[in-house]
Amino acid sequence: MSNEAERQILVVHLLANDGLCTGCRAWWSRLTPYPCWQVNWATSRQARSMTAALLGGRA
Ligand SMILES: [Zn+2]
């Protein structure tokens, strides 16, 4: 369930040609420099579960 949320964020929040986040502009009409905090959140969560998997845990 959390993995799905992270994936959806990363699908929508992409780097635009002008260096801004496309997801934040589309959803909230906000001009947010990429990576926005949502991308940072999703990528840090993915990195954490990847690290846990490498250590032999079942994240
Ligand atoms: Zn964004």
Image (tube, rainbow, N blue to C red):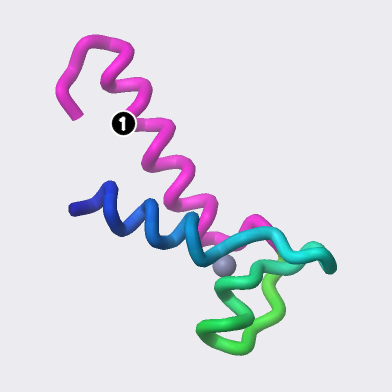
Q: Is residue 24 magenta?
A: no
Residue appearing at x 81%, y 64% in the figure? 17
Q: Report the residue marked by disc 1.
A: 49
Label 1 neighbour load within 10 Å: few <14, some 14-19, many 20+: some
Residue farthest toward the right in the current orientation of the protein = 18
Which amino acid lies under the numbered mark 1 shown in the image of this protein?
Ser
Residue depicted at x 27% and y 19%: 53
Q: Main secondary structure of the magenta part?
A: helix
Which segment is the magenta one? 34-59
Helix, strand or loop status at disc 1: helix
Q: Is the CB of mark 1 within 8 Å of ligand 1? A: no
Viewer-side residue, 52 vs 26: 26
Left or right relative to 54: residue 37: right
Which quadrant of the structure image shows residue 44? top left
Measuring 54% from the left and 86% from the top, which residue is drawn there?
A: 28
Q: Residue 25 appears in which quarter of the rendering?
A: bottom right
Q: Nearer the viewer, residue 14 or 35?
A: 14
> Residue 57: x, y in percent?
18, 17
Count every numbered label the image shows and give the total. Answer: 1
In the rendered structure, does residue 47 fall within the stretch colored magenta? yes
* Image quarter of the C terminus: top left
